[in-house]
Image (cartoon, grey):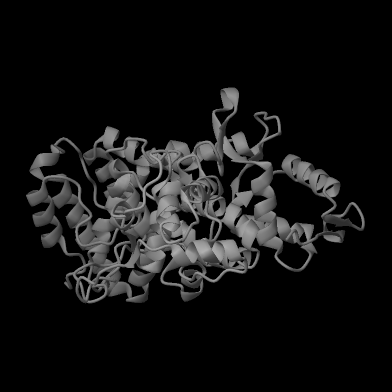
Amino acid sequence: MVQTLDREYLKNHLEQTKRHDTGKVLDILPFSSNRKKSIRGQFNQILGEYIRNICDFELNNKAFREKEFFLSADSHELSEHIANNVDYNDDDDAYDFVRFLDQYLFNQKDIRPIHPFLFNYIEVEKTLKNEVGKYGQFMNGTLVKESPEIKAIFNNKESDDILTELILEMLDGIEEKQSQGKNTKSKQYQPLLANFTRIYQEDILYLSKYKDYFLSSFPLLTQYYVFMYTCQLTLKFEQFIEANMEDAHPLYFALEWESMSKRRKATDELESYKYIKENAINLFRHIHTISHISHNSLNKGEDGTEKIKFVPYSTLYQLIKNKGVEYEEDFLKEINQWIQDYSSLSWLNLDSVSVDEAKTIPQAFKLLFNCLKEGTSTDVAKRFGENIGDLGANQFLKTRGNYGQVFNIKHDFLLLLTAVSVKDKRIPLNDLFKELEKRGVAFDRYSKKEIISLFDNLNILDKKSDSGDAQYVKPIL
């Protein structure tokens, strides 16, 4: 029998660590089971790390603090740093210029990016540095994947107005990351949902043609894609071998100004946030189950390192079937044996759990998952899954009384999604709803009626008749 699963490595690794660990497999999410809610409401700081990862930059705060120029304890370091490179007639002029920069560049303590390059200057609080750093790496590796077009948006200082040009010219404190050997660029996160992330890139590149709108909408659109990406993984893993790992599965949203009822799709048990929230506890368990079965003879190392790919159930099942009946039988034997090996790990205390042999690969996947469900801490799995809600809080989730939290779309975000879905040419209304579904957003007939009414009032609907096929949505930008 061919060794299909690296059971020896898995058993030794888990016995040595005495905890659940993904072994050689690449990470797929930056979540921590030691959840502190520190990411909730802090997406702006994540954005700074994300952009610096895209551009291979790092922020050198010492460049600001080593300046000789100092006017006021209330001024921002970045404002004084820029002002330090300008000549003045007297101290009053210098003071006025710093005050102007403070108002122009900052919203209280947060920088207001007036140019894409300034996203690189969004700072991270020291207490959040480690967690935010993981999110920045995850988003870059998952959403951008070294796209030169997206990198070009954020790493150049070209501007068409004199003031912004002056500010960018006087800025430094951004440095290229120091190389740490040949594996500096090796992957840490395994990207999944290829078509979903491709659509994100297309949307960002389209928005970048409209500078002012891009600066205000890029953070919101990116936060949505990160949030929906995590929701999609939760849903896909629950589907086991039936999952389509390329495209998003549309989930039902409600418009913020709508009233809700139990008949609405956004409040039911399936294809709604209720389903995601209830199954988020399984996300940790699925990740470790898939990590176990990813240690197989079909999975080779990544980028010359020992790291191997995270191979979801549906992808792995297809790879196994492609190898033929004999290989499939060998894999089934190995996974059944691994279920026994895992269940007998001394630190798990699963001796009382009875495990029958699976008859098929799909059964074996579910059986191993159920064993990990017994073997993992409920509290750890719960905290891990709750990270999803932190990403969507106050923006894409809304509590609706007895119905609990539902997926939520505000007025400005609906128009933003419409803008990137329609782009430069009008499209049939029905095609708009299909485009939204590709981005993970579905609406029931009540919400669609509200949207048509809104678009009609905003004069972005060419209404030839009441038929959806005869109505067109105009470009917004």
Using the image, determine if residue 130 lies above or below residue 423: above
> How many circles with numbers are drawn on the protein?
0
Compared across the picture, whether 3 is left or right of 28 comes to left
Q: Residue at x 21, y 40 (%)?
A: 375
| Image quadrant occupied by the N terminus | bottom left
| Relative depth, front residue between 208 and 303 | 208
Q: Residue at x 85, y 48 (%)?
A: 456
| Relative depth, front residue between 406 and 39 | 39
* Quadrant of the rendered image containing residue 38: top left
Residue lying furthest front: 89
Query: What percent of the width, then of the height, locates residue 345?
Result: 11, 46
Compared across the picture, whether 33 is left or right of 70 comes to left
Using the image, determine if residue 443 lies above or below residue 117: above
* Quadrant of the rendered image containing residue 437: bottom right
| Residue 90 at least partly seen | yes
Q: Residue at x 40, y 68 (%)?
A: 55
